[in-house]
Amino acid sequence: MGIATELRGKRVINARGYSTKVGGSRPSAEVMEAMVEASTFFVRIEDLQASAGAVIAELTGAEAGYVTAGASAGLTLAAAAAIARLDPGRMNRLPQSDGMPNEIVLLRRHRNDYDHALRLAGARLVEVGFNDWTFAYEIEEAIGERTAAVFYLGSDEHANLSLADVVAIAHRHDVPVIVDGSMALPPAANLRRFFEIGADLVSFSGGKHIQGPQASGILAGRRDLITSVALQHQDMDVYPEMWPSRGLIADHVVVGPPHHGIGRGFKVGKEEACGLIAALRAYVRRDFAAEAARLGGYADEIASGLAGIRGLHARRVDGHLVPGAMGRPGPHVEVEVGPDAGLTAFELVNRLQAGDPIVCTWEGKAFEGQVRFYPDGLADGEASEVVVAARRACGA
């Protein structure tokens, strides 16, 4: 038994999709080889980030890119860049942002569990509109001299104001737009689409559908903002005379290096950076049609295996395939737990997680009596184990 098997406890079957709660994804051998190779050498992290950023820019179409410690870390760095820009004095003060533009405007429907990542940098969130409708003039009126950026949730395909609408409004006022793209992959087209629309900074998860290291992410966008990100993230235990980026002083971009910034706690190791780039290069070559066919087979097996259980109605759903849709457009299984099932949706989830192996599902709709099975993280043979565990949990 290896140390990883020893530490994990009971085996887990991942039927909730790529998720931090169950360890992200299964990085390929190509990704792991890149990480192992990186562990054998030393490198100046700013040089590695510059090289990685060039690859990210090429594959996303953005001006510049940066490897982060996950999508949430990317949002904090994006907010810090929008607030401080290229002012080292402001960088040194964050998250204390009084006296500087620190407001981030967002649609009320885009408030979510993760927007604390923006507030962590010192941002003050300004909500506009209602949960189901926002007028363009409400964003226009909310933008003022204290506005640092406008935020948009990239996985929301139902907002009445599109990203293009929001970008047009923000750019009229010379305000950047930050997009949370953590759940916007797939479709893979979104890797470039947000920048084609005009987003200024987009944060993607590296450890989910891209299948890179779990604690990795991508932040891409405007070159000046990515430069601010780098200055607030990298090791700044330097003197101006010996600073590798002292050319920024000579070029009058900054007056000098900042101290350790808001992103110091989000540092990325050389192994994660190299693994993420290996995964990203592989991502743009992947055969998503073949993947959808394989996952569809797993979904069919689960749906048919749960047929006939009293009180349960299982059906395969193929989801959305439109650009900008929620980042799970592939096939999955929705199970409605009826009143005559002998248990609630909550109890079904809990029984599956109490078994051996543990079966993890997506429980976001359990309060509505629905449990979802996403096959993205399943290996061959595990769909049948999901069926066995679910039938046992239902007493079938």
Image (spheres, rainbow, N blue to C red):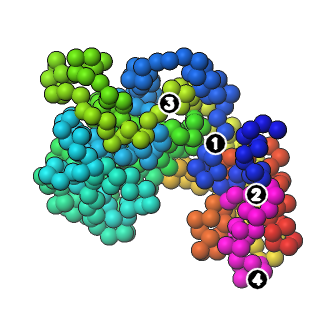
Q: Please tell me which of labels 2 and 4 falls first in the chain.
A: 4
> From what the image shows, is residue 163 above or below residue 211?
below
Q: CA distance from mark 2 to mark 4?
A: 25 Å
Drawn side of residue 382 relative to residue 291, left or right: right
Q: Please tell me which of labels 3 and 2 falls first in the chain.
A: 3
The picture places residue 65, in percent across and down from the top left corner, at 38, 30
Q: CA distance from mark 3 to mark 4?
A: 52 Å
Q: Which mark is residue 358?
A: 2
Of the two numbered discs 3 and 4 in the rendering, the one whose residue sits closer to the viewer:
3
The quarter of the picture where the N terminus appears is: top right
Range of magenta residues: 335-361
Whether residues under marks 1 and 3 lie with C-beta atoms below 8 angstroms apart, the answer is no
Q: Please tell me which of labels 2 and 1 falls first in the chain.
A: 1
Q: Which mark is residue 25?
A: 1
User: In which quadrant of the rendered view does residue 135 lie?
Assistant: bottom left
User: Where does label 4 land, which residue?
Assistant: 340
Whether residues under marks 2 and 4 lie with C-beta atoms below 8 angstroms apart, the answer is no
84 within the magenta span: no
Residue plotted at (24% across, 40% down): 91
Looking at the image, which is closer to me, 91 or 332?
A: 91
Q: Could you say whether the residue bearing mark 4 is in a helix, strand or loop? A: loop
